[in-house]
Image (cartoon, grey):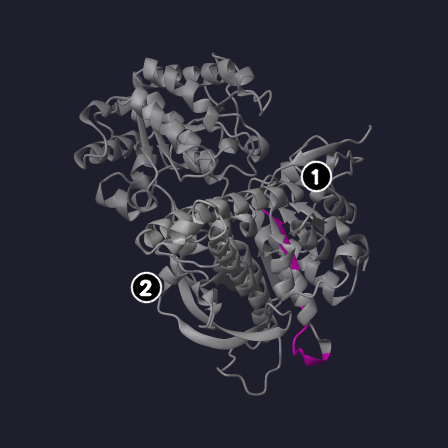
Amino acid sequence: MKSRSRSVSPNIRVPSQYTLLNSFHSSEKETLMYFNFFQRSVRMGYRIPFLGPLLEKKGCRWFSFIILILIGLTLFQAFITILGSILWENDKLILEKQTYDPVPYLGLDPNVPDKLSNGTTIYHVSKEFGPATLGSMGQIVTGLAQAQANNGSYAVHVILPYYSYLRNLYRSEKFAQLEVQVRDRHGKQQPVKFMVNRFWWNITDNPDVMSSEPPKPYSIRVYVIGPPSRESDSFHSAFKANDVSEIYYSPLRQLPQEWEDVYFCKAVAELITYLNTDIDTPLFDLTDARGVDVVHIHGSSNALVIEFMNSLYVKEKVRWPKPAIAYTLHDYIEEPIYSNSISYVQKFLDLGNYTEIKPQYFHGHRMYTSAVAIDQAQIVTFVSKIIAQEMIEGSLDFYAKELIMPSILNRAIKGEWIGITNGLDFTGFNPFNNTMLIETNSNFPRNIYTFDAALLYAETIENSSQSLIITSKYSAKLHLIREGLLSYGDLNRMIVLFIGKFQYNKGLDFFQAATELLASQDVLFIIMGQISDYPIDSLQQLVTIYPNNVLIIQDVEFQTNWGILYRAAADILFVPSKTESFGLTAAEGLLFGCPIVSTGVGGLKEFLVNKTSLSMKDGYNSYLFNLLDETNIKLSINDMKAALNNSINDLKVLNNNPIEKEVFIRDLMKGALKLGWNRPGGPIEMYIRAYRMALLKIRNDIDHVETLLSE
């Protein structure tokens, strides 16, 4: 197939060095340049024919000076706009379209043991975890770390930025004061000190939410990387955030997000090196006597941790063996196009002739880091087995794949590209023991497996001796009405719920057509999530047109407090995603007793079972419609409406037969409960085996898994 060029405009973020505000923080030299530009503009005013005499005339001097300032600002703004557009145009990502020969998916060899030695230390590196969870990555890292800690045999840790709001939530202890080398504006290395604190994050061992046995307490040690301590500049504003909604972008910060990302990567590498070094006189007692066995890096924004670790590693100075590194890609849309300005990277890392040796990492003035981690980690995983397989066998084509596919295929040939489908975390988020649901009598009964359907038919709903889920869902809706969060007219109306970021790839451009259908059926459409790249005005317009049928919930704190009640009260979950790595929201929807209306793309197909005919009575959990072309949803509108309409009509039938509705909801939940982290042959076993491969590979200096397994 003939190659051709295409322009790819990264949509993960606008490069921060080209935005007007962040340009003022690039360097003192740039700030001085802007001042000199303005000063020259003022001097030039004396040479303008109509302004020169006015500036020299005492009575008009102030008035003329104001006019001159306005002219100067206008010229300055025009200059910055033109300069920014030129730089942005020159920095576009231009990729040559490539086709790749399919590579058979090997997956994990079943001969790899699923156990590690007792006391193995695992360090997860992430921007999100536990109390700092904003999206699916945080939920996945939290669930994985909890499930590993619940095993009781491993020492599980998390390394996280020290977001300022966490100081009010946890009492941390100082662990170590470390330093990173950062180049100043003259290119000289300068030491920048930073503090590492740590605290215990308590969890409970409750993998079986059906059990009434008291859970066992476990803890995860969380290391939090503080901001640089240099008070002479804006470094100290790193990681400032009023709440979880500001962990990526906050008005409190004076630094570009990219700068923080690179700093965090180097600080993490310093911490890991410190933990693995035999230190004679540490500032604080080093109690972690084992060192670091496994470093699990999550997401491309943390990919440079590996590069920094390699640059810091000196074999003669370390006490413990070099840690094995696992790298997980959490999606195939945004992570491949994540990038950093080369100028920011060079502040922390001496690239030397790296751009010539590894040109595949660099495009324009930016470094695309995901491939760096894919190439250098001992094992690379993706959060869905089916997508990992489709990526290398050729059936999945995705945006800007040229950035990472050569690296992925190289690892796949060696058996080091592993798809591990995520699990559902039941320990802290489920409809059975949530405090809010219990206080409102809306918690679901635990008798999922002991429920006797025949007995319910014999007793009838009104006289049932068994606790019912439909009663709990009704109670959740009733409490929302009492709190004024729903209207009394909603008590007997169906609720279709959407949960997710307001993004194009979540299928929000289906909402107009979906809302028209739902309004015609007098169904309430609740849209719950956070603002992203999809225009909020378009969503607000739906409220204006259909005020009785659309409710938008975008406040993060409100969702934290009340979101679980909306989930419990919902009847149908709408997941019209154009891309989906795993589909955590859909899996949680099943757990809360909602059938799913969805495209079934990506990882969703691993657990969604479509109702293929109107006569189908059981064995399904979803109504799927075909996404024919993600760039032209008009081709799929009618199919989407049909799926949504079928789900509503089926629910109407079930509402007239509450016993069948109870049985149907319980079947949905049984399917969701099979998706736990600790399921047999599930993600916990898979990750432990992946770690085992990585450890054997690095400790035995083996470069091929087949060689490793033959020993």
Residue 370, numbered circle: none
Left or right, 546 with respect to 51, comes to left
Of the pair 464 and 246, the residue shown nearer to us: 246
**Residue in the picture at 54% in, 46% down:** 79
Label 1 sits on residue? 94
* Whole-percent x, y for residue 701 in the image: 78, 65
Q: Is residue 287 above or below residue 404?
A: below
Q: Nearer the viewer, residue 404 or 17?
A: 17
State the separation of the CA atoms marked 2 and 1: 45 Å
Position of the C terminus by quadrant: bottom right
Q: In the shown orientation, is residue 337 left or right of residue 574?
A: right
- Judged from the image, the secondary structure of the residue bearing numbered disc 2 is helix
The type of residue carrying mark 1 is Ile
- Quarter of the figure with residue 449: top left
Image mark for residue 168? 2
Numbered range of the magenta stretch: 316-329
Asked if residue 600 is among those painted magenta in the image, a careful observer would answer no
Q: Secondary structure at mark 1?
A: strand
Q: Is residue 119 left or right of residue 528?
A: right
- Sequence-wise first label, 2 or 1: 1
Residue at point 43%, 44% (across, down): 50
Q: Quadrant of the N terminus?
A: top right
Residue 125 can be seen, yes or no: no
Q: Is residue 188 visible?
A: yes
Amino acid type shown at disc 2: Asn
